Image (cartoon, grey):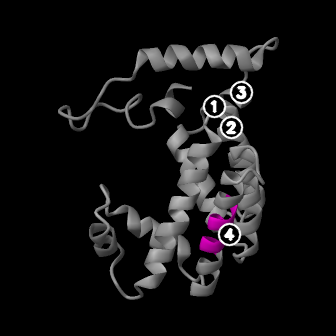
Amino acid sequence: MLELLYPQTWSASPSNPRYDRPPDTRLLQNEIERLLLYAHPDPIRESHVRDLIETGPNDRVFRFIDAVFAGQLDVATAELERLLLAGEEPAKLMAQVQQQVELAALVAAAPGKPPIEIGRALALTNPNRMSGVAASVRGRSVRSLIAAVDHATDVDRKLKTGHLRQPADALYHLLAKLARTTEPTRSRAGH
C-alpha cells in the first residue's frame, strides 16, 4: 500500500530535498480506514489495496478522459464508476470532459501550430497540457472533433433544460455520444 500511495518517496531517498515532501500520515490513516470499510467483514487483501489505491484520483481522471477520447467506452465507463465510488462529483467530471472536447477542437482548428503555443495563446496556467490534448486527438478527423463539440453542447443544453436531470446521467449520455464519434483503439493493456 505504501509503495502505491507514495511511489516516488516511500522506498527512495529524497532526490531534491527542497521540494520532496515526506509521506502524509493523515492520508495514510484515511486510506487504512477506507480499506477496512471496503473489505469489511473480510480481512484486507492485496486486491482490496489495488482496487482502492492503485493510483491517485488525478491519475484516474486522466485515464478516464484518455479512454473517452480513445473511444474505449468500456474502459471509460469502468473508470467513471471508480471515480464516482471514490466520491468524484459528476458535474466536475462532466466539465473536465467538456473542456477536453473544447481544447481538442482548438488544436484541430490550428493545424501545424505547436500545441504549447496554442496553450499560451489561450493563457492556460499550464500551456504544456496542450501537448497531451494534441496527442489524444492524433489521427482524428476535424469532422469527428466538430461532432464531439456538438455532442458536448447538446448534452449540456439537455442538462440545463431538464431533459437530463442528473449530472451523472448527462455524463453517461455524453460518453455514449462521444464513443460514436471516435474509432475505438486498443487499450494499453492490449484488451
> Magenta part of the protein: which range?
148-155
Within-10-Å neighbours for mark 2: few <14, some 14–19, many 20+: some
**In the structure shown, which secondary structural element does the residue marked by tag 3 occupy?**
helix
Earlier along the polypeptide chain: callout 4 or callout 3?
3
Circles 1 and 2, Cβ within 8 Å, touching? The answer is yes
Residue where numbered disc 4 is placed: 151
Q: Is residue 152 magenta?
A: yes
From the image, tell me which residue sits under label 1. Answer: 87
Kindly identify the residue that appears in the image at 17 percent across and 33 percent down.
Answer: 18
Q: Is residue 113 visible?
A: yes
Residue beneath disc 3: 48
Residue shown at 53% from the left, 33% from the top: 4
Residue 188 in view here: no
Which part of the image, by quadrant, shows the C terminus?
bottom right
Nearest-to-viewer mark from 4 and 1: 4
Q: For the residue carrying disc 1, how many other residues have a C-alpha within 10 Å: few (<14), some (14-19), or many (20+)?
A: few
Q: Amino acid at mark 2?
A: Leu
Task: Name which of mark 3 and mark 1 comes first in the sequence.
Answer: 3
The amino acid type, in three-letter code, at marker 3 is His
Residue type for callout 1:
Gly
Numbered badge on residue 25: none
State the CA–CA distance, disc 1 to disc 2.
5 Å
In the image, residue 173 lies at what x, y percent? 76, 58
Q: Is residue 173 magenta?
A: no
State which quadrant residue 98 falls in.
bottom right
Q: Residue furthest front?
A: 161
Q: Earlier in the sequence, mark 4 or mark 1?
A: 1
Q: Which residue is painted at 50% across and 72% down in the image?
A: 104
